[in-house]
Amino acid sequence: VDHLIYEKDQAEVTQFVENYLNFANQNNRFLRDDNEIVVDLQQQMDLLVEKINQDKAQKRAQNKSNDPSDIPRTKLYIAVNGAPNAFSLPDGSVVMNLSLINLLASKDEVMGILIHEVSHFEDNFLRWRNELQRVGSVGAGPLVERFQEYKADFVGSRLKAIGMNGQAMSSALERLATYDKQRIEALNNNPFNRLMNGIAKRFSLETYKQYE
């Protein structure tokens, strides 16, 4: 939150993050920091942030940018319950549900989603009010729409920068679009079953499905 310009905004966002994480701790269960999935993805995120900050420093040195700030170190939390989702918070936290990881087909696709979330930290931090409203309405709206904010080719270039498949974000979006379609069809066919499945998803614990 030190990236925020005004003290009023810092206090507002800090309080929100504290309240949200307290709520999350009471309503979600997270994998331990030493879990192999968390360690692996955290290392990839650290590499990504390092490369982004190196690029920013190079642009400043070449007078191609006047942005003085670097992206803060991000901290990944993986919730083992809840519907597929991922979002970032102004303190550098990135939260991803294990159900979303299991929905995707490869680590490259997972990193495409995480690159999308990390990219929020490059935006003007005063825009976090909009992001906080989105977090407050988690589960509303199609998944694919929430992860199309940054173009697939932009995410693809960053995937390539950390040695991953540059097409992975495109395939991830296709997979999410299929999930959204199936979810809407299930809701239209039987709203009661959809409601009960949603409740069950909220409180049941997800187990990790190894990529093929």
Image: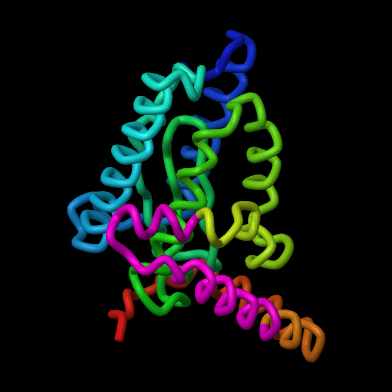
Residue located at (64% from left, 77% from top): 177
The residue at the far top in this view is 7
Asked if residue 175 is among those painted magenta in the image, a careful observer would answer yes
Q: Look at the image and name its color scheme.
A: rainbow
Quadrant of the drawing holding the C terminus? bottom left
| Main SS class of the magenta portion in the image | helix
Image location (x, y in percent) of residue 45: 32, 48
Image location (x, y in percent) of residue 4: 55, 18
Residue located at (29% from left, 38% from top): 50
Residue located at (51% from left, 52% from top): 116
Asked if residue 83 is among those painted magenta in the image, a careful observer would answer no
Residue located at (62% from left, 20% from top): 12
Image location (x, y in percent) of residue 128: 63, 32
Which stretch is magenta? 155-182
Image location (x, y in percent) of residue 74: 36, 39
Q: Nearer the viewer, residue 63 or 91?
A: 63
Q: Quadrant of residue 210?
A: bottom left
The residue at the far bottom in this view is 189
The residue at the far front in this view is 62
